[in-house]
Image (spheres, rainbow, N blue to C red):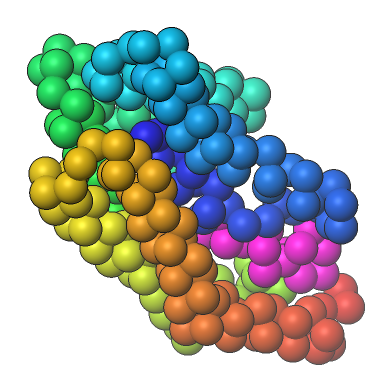
């Protein structure tokens, strides 16, 4: 299955969406990235009689197209979205050429590992990749909070340490997911891994959100709130 849901789990909030609008915005990509691939796989294989390889291939198309569309719609290159799109397409083509359904399942793990490594490298380079996804969640589109974020990012080493920690948690989580799903792809039945791989992915996303929130996003939000409420936050 496609791992564009990784992007969905990471980007937990947008700059201005609240209430029902925000919920709908986050639920739709989750449905497209998770429910559609799983449902279409079993429909194509059991309902239409396609081979396991063909069903896996066609069920991966919709999430890949959605990722491409999101990149084109934003009209700017988002490093995380571009990385996910590239490895998704490369993995899909590799699996189709190889003709191995287990390799096709394992390629999702490869995608997770590439993203995880990319996130960790971005931390080492001093440009944590996950910051783009986290900032709207912390600032909530508020001008005072956004200004406070910028001031803290430029002048607080403690704030920057939390920023790096957030990306580190996600990088390690994605690499861990990779190991679990590769083992499952080559030791469990393909039909089992189609849904179990998604369960592993969702559990990884949930765990990473909880841990990164407690270790980094929560403290960062508290710092931003305090900075925005202070004397400089009124300017």
Give the dominant element type of the magenta stretch: helix, strand or loop: helix
Location of residue 69 with respect to 83 vertically, above or below: above
Depth check: 54 or 201 in front?
A: 54
134 lies left or right of 101: right
Whether residue 91 appears in magenta in the rendering, the answer is: no
Horizontal and vertical percent for residue 131? 51, 59
Tell me the magenta residue range: 131-146
Identify the residue at horizontal 60%, vertical 81% (top origin).
Answer: 218
Q: Is residue 174 visible?
A: yes
57 lies left or right of 188: right
Identify the residue at horizontal 74%, vertical 88% (top origin).
Answer: 226
Horizontal and vertical percent for residue 233? 81, 79
- Quarter of the image for residue 86 reads top left
Depth check: 228 or 30 in front?
A: 30
Which quadrant is home to the N terminus?
A: top left
Q: Is residue 84 visible?
A: no
């Amino acid at each position: 299955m496609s791992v564009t849901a990784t992007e969905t789990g990471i980007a937990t909030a947008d700059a201005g969406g609240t209430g029902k609008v925000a919920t709908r915005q986050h639920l739709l990509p989750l449905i497209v990235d998770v429910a559609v691939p799983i449902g279409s796989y079993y429909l194509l294989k059991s309902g239409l009689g396609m081979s396991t390889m063909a069903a896996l291939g066609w069920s991966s198309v919709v999430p890949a197209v959605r990722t491409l569309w999101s990149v084109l719609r934003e009209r700017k290159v988002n490093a995380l979205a571009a990385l996910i799109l590239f490895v998704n397409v490369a993995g899909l083509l590799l699996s189709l050429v190889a003709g191995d359904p287990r390799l096709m399942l394992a390629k999702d793990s490869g995608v997770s590992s590439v993203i995880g490594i990319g996130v960790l490298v971005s931390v080492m380079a001093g440009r944590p990749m996950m910051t783009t996804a986290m900032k709207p969640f912390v600032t909530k589109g508020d001008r005072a909070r956004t200004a406070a974020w910028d001031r803290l990012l430029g002048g607080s080493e403690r704030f920057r340490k939390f920023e790096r920690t957030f990306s580190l948690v996600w990088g390690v989580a994605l690499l861990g997911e990779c190991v679990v799903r590769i083992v499952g792809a080559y030791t469990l039945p393909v039909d089992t891994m189609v849904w179990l791989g998604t369960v592993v992915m969702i559990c990884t996303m949930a765990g990473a959100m909880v841990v990164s929130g407690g270790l980094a996003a929560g403290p960062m939000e508290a710092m931003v709130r305090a900075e925005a409420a202070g004397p400089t936050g009124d300017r």
